[in-house]
Structures are given as C-alpha cells and as structure tokens.
Image (cartoon, grey):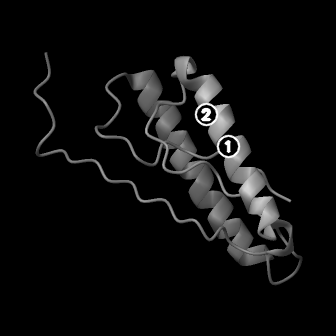
Amino acid sequence: MVLPTGMSCALCEPPHDMGVLALHVLGVLSMRQLDRDVLHYSSEIPITVVPPLCPLAVSALDFFQTGSLIGRIARQTTDWLATGGLDRTGRCTRRSRITIDLENRPAST
C-alpha cells in the first residue's frame, strides 16, 4: 500500500515564494515518479495507492489549513475504503489537473 505525498493540484496562481515553489515542484515530481513506478511495478506485484487529496488549492506550507485538510482526507479515505479501495491495485484513478491561468493572474504588487 502506498500513501502518496499529494500536491497542490488546484492552485489559482503559481507560488510566488521560491521556497514554496521548490516544495510545489518536489511534490509534482514525487507524484509523477510514483505514477511511473506504479505503472512499471504493478505488473510484478499488487500495489494499492490511496488517492491523495484533490482538488487541493493550498500550498504545502499553509499550516492554517491543517485542520480542514485532515478532515477532508479522513472523509475521502473513509469513502474510498467503503467503496472497496483496498481491493483496487495499480495506478491511482484520480488524476490531478494542474491549471494555472498565467494570462489572467493579478498584477504583482
């Protein structure tokens, strides 16, 4: 069983701080690598991936959202378990869409 790190998949604009941007990029790379690894190794062994929280429109460093995020992922995982999530193997069926509208973002101040 794999518990993925997840990533901010529904940001309205790109991170402005270099530290937050670096963490965002690491999250995206981690999820891409996990997807590749599961695709590669799932033919050899059964792999169950717990779906990460998505949509996620907050940064990994926004600790003010911790309580609500824990509540959301608890409900999502409970629903996933109730619908036979542990019986599913292979790639995560929930696909993230990262869309950042660079043309219509507010001007920097």
The image shows residue 73 at horizontal and vertical percentages of 67, 43
Look at the image and tell me in which quarter the C terminus lies: top left
Residue 82 versus residue 52 in the image, above or below: below
Residue 36 visible? The answer is yes
Residue indicated by mark 1 = 73
Q: Is residue 54 above or below residue 22?
A: below
Mark count: 2
- Residue type (three-letter) at the residue carrying disc 1: Ile
**Looking at the image, can residue 4 be seen?**
no
Dot 1 lies on which element?
helix
Residue 56 higher or lower than 80, as above or below: above
Residue drawn where x is 71% and y is 67% of the image? 37
Q: Is residue 87 left or right of residue 10?
A: right
Instruction: Please give the residue where the numbered disc 2 appears in the rendered image.
Output: 69
Question: Which kind of residue does numbered mark 2 sit on?
Answer: Leu
Residue extending farthest to the bottom is 43
Please report the residue visible at 11 percent of the width from the left and 46 percent of the height from the top: 103
Residue 68: quadrant of the picture: top right
| Left or right: residue 9 compared with residue 107 | right
The spot of residue 46 in percent (x, y) is 87, 75
| Quadrant containing the N terminus in the rendered view | bottom right
Q: Judge left or right: residue 45 versus residue 60.
A: right
Disc 1 vs disc 2: Cβ atoms closer than 8 Å? Answer: yes
Would you say 89 lies left or right of 27 here?
right
